[in-house]
Amino acid sequence: MAKALKTKSKASPSTPQPPRIAIAIMAAGKGTRLKSKHPKVLHEIGGKPILAHVIATAKQIVPAQDIFAIIGHEAERVREAVAGTGVNFVLQAEQRGTGHALMVAREALSGNGNRTRYDQVIVLSGDAPLITAETIKKLSAFHTLQKAAMTLLSADLDNPYGYGRVIRKRARGGAEVQAIVEEKSATPQQKKIREINSGFYVFAAPALYEHIDRLSTKNAHGEYYLTDMAEIFQRVRQKVVVMKTSDAGEVLGTNTRAEMMVLDARLRMAKCRALLEEGVTIYYPHTCVIDSDVEVGADTVIEPFVQLLGKTKIGADCRIRSYSVIGNSTLADRVIIKPGTIMEASRVDAGAVLGPYTHMRPGSEIGEGAHLGNFVETKKIKMGKGSKANHLTYLGDAEIGEAVNIGAGTITCNYDGVTKHKTVIEDRAFIGSDSTLVAPIKIGRDSYVAAASCITEDVPEDALALGRARQSVKEGWARARRDAQKDQHR
């Protein structure tokens, strides 16, 4: 009987586990060159705080629970502004440099007791909002591949003045760093180097916190500089390497108002390009202000000088005409916004037409196919399908049914000096021009309100309501007045 052959299965090599990564965002600085009373990282570009952009990038790499914003100047304001992102906060009460920031974050980043210990600490700058998740992921992977203690991100700048220069160990393949030389300490030859230190780093967490206490304040500003870790690691024969980004623009910071506006323009143009690639038509993109979080559907047309702000969402096949400003609002498909329309925290259903010069204040909800026209103002209303208010009208705290016609000059009087009151206009009601509806009031379905009426009581269904003085005509009155004026001047 033949024996069954036994084959030895080769043990597959264990798959390397991805590093446990923490991201530290430097957000404690004041930003004195901005000449502002507000924290530097809370200044807005692209429609939201600078720090919010950096956090959004970090959240593409690790969960919010592994992100630590190191805050200091106006700490509570910064914390409140981005609390909704879910990130952690580390207080650097006394700002003594970038190295000091990671010192105060030691417990959070290196682990304590049963807390997770991270393998890598990625350091991002809270005032450099253009950095991409793709670049940071590459930097982390490069750090792992190089088995480095410290990896820094560099860039080539046409004008590197003011930045620290990266001196490489060319004899060892080019990736290893020999020194980081600051502008003030650089020799004339070193100042010709265009490769600069961007201020973005990856550290091996255990090595960082084993040696971070070697940082010294023996410098002109009396601060702990994170760049000095390169020299410290080299003294203990730990590897320091550099990776260069192909896009130097993404490492730029915002030290001045002028730099801030350059980055804002770059962000907004990138947003326009992304929308164009998604099938949106934008005429003269450089004239439009479109915030980073705005969403626009395919085949929508955006004319020059439009502003789309906040978390606005616009459907497909819409047209947004010039000089309209839409903030934190939602538009369904096939909506037409005529010139000069202003909209804030409102919603518009499919096929509606608004403007020109309509002003929709917060809480306005406009139904399918409805029309709001010239100089119509709304606030906290619900307007049903196919209803119209085409001219010179104020509608506040109102519930308007379907197929309602509201004539020019109509006003809902919703405020009595103390309390806001509601107006209800039911389906197919017809409100004549120059009507005044004194809330609280209800206009029944299929009813009519005569023009120039002041309505103070409910109107039942199918009724006609008139609320105006009876007209009287005094024949010859004007002639008599003129004659009397002539007699006075004789």
Image: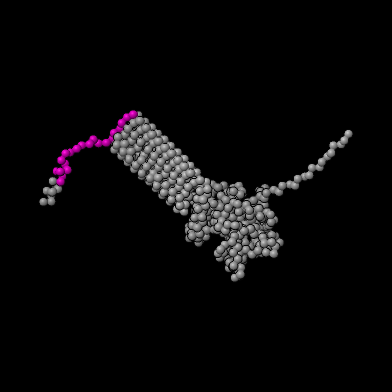
**Residue toward you, 129 or 205:** 129
Q: Is residue 244 above or below residue 408?
A: below
* Residue lying at 50% horizontally and 53% vertically, measured from the top left: 269
Residue 413 appears in the picture as rendered: no
Regarding residue 242, the answer to whether it shows in the image is yes
Q: How is the image coloured?
A: one colour
Q: Residue furthest right?
A: 1
Left or right of 372? Residue 194 is right
Residue 467 sits above or below residue 19 on the image: above
Q: Residue at x 13, y 46 (%)?
A: 483
Circle count: 0
Q: Name the foreground residue: 129 vs 396.
A: 129
* 61 part of magenta stretch: no
Residue 250: percent from the left, percent from the top? Answer: 56, 56
280 left or right of 459 in image:
right
| First to last magenta residue range | 462-482
Q: Position of residue 92 (x, y in %)?
A: 57, 56
Say whether residue 470 is magenta. Answer: yes
Image location of residue 386, percent across then percent down? 40, 36
Residue situated in front as seen by the camera: 294 or 380: 294
Outermost left residue: 490
Residue name at image x 28 percent, y 35 percent: 467
Residue reaching furthest to the bottom: 188
Instruction: State which quadrant residue 473 falls in.
Output: top left
The residue that appears at 17% across and 43% down in the rendered structure is 478
Classify the position of the N terminus by image quarter.
top right
Image location of residue 287, percent across then percent down? 45, 53
The rendered magenta stretch, by its main secondary structure, is classed as loop
The image quadrant of residue 206 is bottom right
